[in-house]
Image: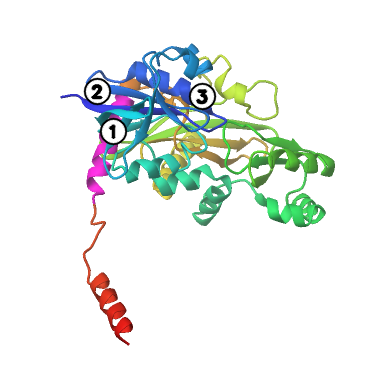
Amino acid sequence: MKKNVIVLYGGESVEHDISIITALQTMKNIDRIYNVIPIYIGKNGIWLVADNMQEVKIYKDFMKIGRKVKFVTLISGKPYVAIRKNGKYSKFINVDFALLCCHGKHGEDGALQGMLCNSHIPYSSCDVKSSAVLMDKIFMKDILISRKLPTIASESIILDDYIKDKKKVLKDISLKLKFPIILKPANLGSSIGIKVCYNLDELEKGVDYCFKFDNRILAEKYLQGITEYNCACVHMNDELKVSDIQMVKKDDDEIYSFGDKYLSEKSDNKEKIDKNLSVKIKNLTLKVYKAFGCYGVIRVDFIFDNSEKKLYINEVNSIPGSLAFYLFKDLSFKDLINCLIEEGVERFTKEQFVSSYDSEALDLFDKINLINKQK
């Protein structure tokens, strides 16, 4: 009997549409030995299924364009999803595995992983803890610094502090980092909400803008004259496999924009990368995977300061776009998906620790209550 694999995508995230693309690519390449059940998470967080989920146009207005749309929910404590129509549950499906194609908020930050844990469903990404930390740029920086891994000088800006004394916060940041400064909402990806500031006035406007996306902001020293690189890593056949390295091609924008990352035409990366730099990138990718206790596939984004000849870890994606299959030149997308499923199931099996324990606590508590009542 084929294993039921649910593919989860969409979600309440600014990366909603990219998640759909990742899922459609994944479902096109998944091995036919699995029974694939796509589950779309709307921008309002509601889980849905329909008969025509492979059509891109359906995601313009799922409720109107979708054929035979039904609602879906997880069953707490059991590896099942329930299909609901007209207010009644019409079908219960046993789930063997969840392939996560969600990016950003509530999909890549541990929230979805926690739901699946509660339903005893193995899944393909990092666990709750590492997902949450990697999604939060400020927490991620703290771990990198504690492990003495190279990262650009930064400060955090907290909304409450900013509201209490805006001038002090802006002055402190500008003195500690010096201009230019780049601002990033702590829990946002795909270069959305990012601002580069060259003076105090731009810093104030940039901070006000970033607070529209998050209540915590990462402020970094903005490096000019840089080259960016991507490298992925996956746990495969009981060892860590590091991908090839991609040199990032940007348009004329000063930062690697959302359009650069997902909407531009990409050709094969034929630029030669310095051998010593390549070794450093791959070694750091391995160290990041281990430092954060990662699972599944991750992509690490690097910045190389060409003037200072220094390499920095920029950020880590625990569910990379298109699952970073394009970085593994000697691994097909199908093989990568198979690896994620097999590794995820094996990890789930190994982690079935004792989670409940019968003690005498309730009996003792009941006796104490009885004694107190008699007094």
| Magenta region, main secondary structure | helix
Residue 341 part of the magenta segment: yes
Residue type for callout 1: Phe
Disc number at residue 18?
A: 3
- Label 1: element kind: strand
Q: Residue 125 is drawn in which quadrant?
A: top left
Q: Is residue 222 visible?
A: no
Q: Earlier in the sequence, mark 2 or mark 3?
A: 3
Mark 2: few/some/many CA within 10 Å (<14, 14-19, 20+): some
Q: Earlier in the sequence, mark 3 or mark 1?
A: 3
Disc number at residue 97?
A: 1
Q: Is residue 111 visible?
A: yes
Residue type for callout 3: Ile
Q: Residue at x 52, y 17 (%)?
A: 61
Side (left or right) of 310 relative to 27: right
Q: CA–CA distance between discs 3 and 1?
A: 22 Å
Circles 3, 1 touching at the beta carbon (< 8 Å): no
Tell me the quarter of the image containing the C terminus: bottom left
- Label 2: element kind: strand
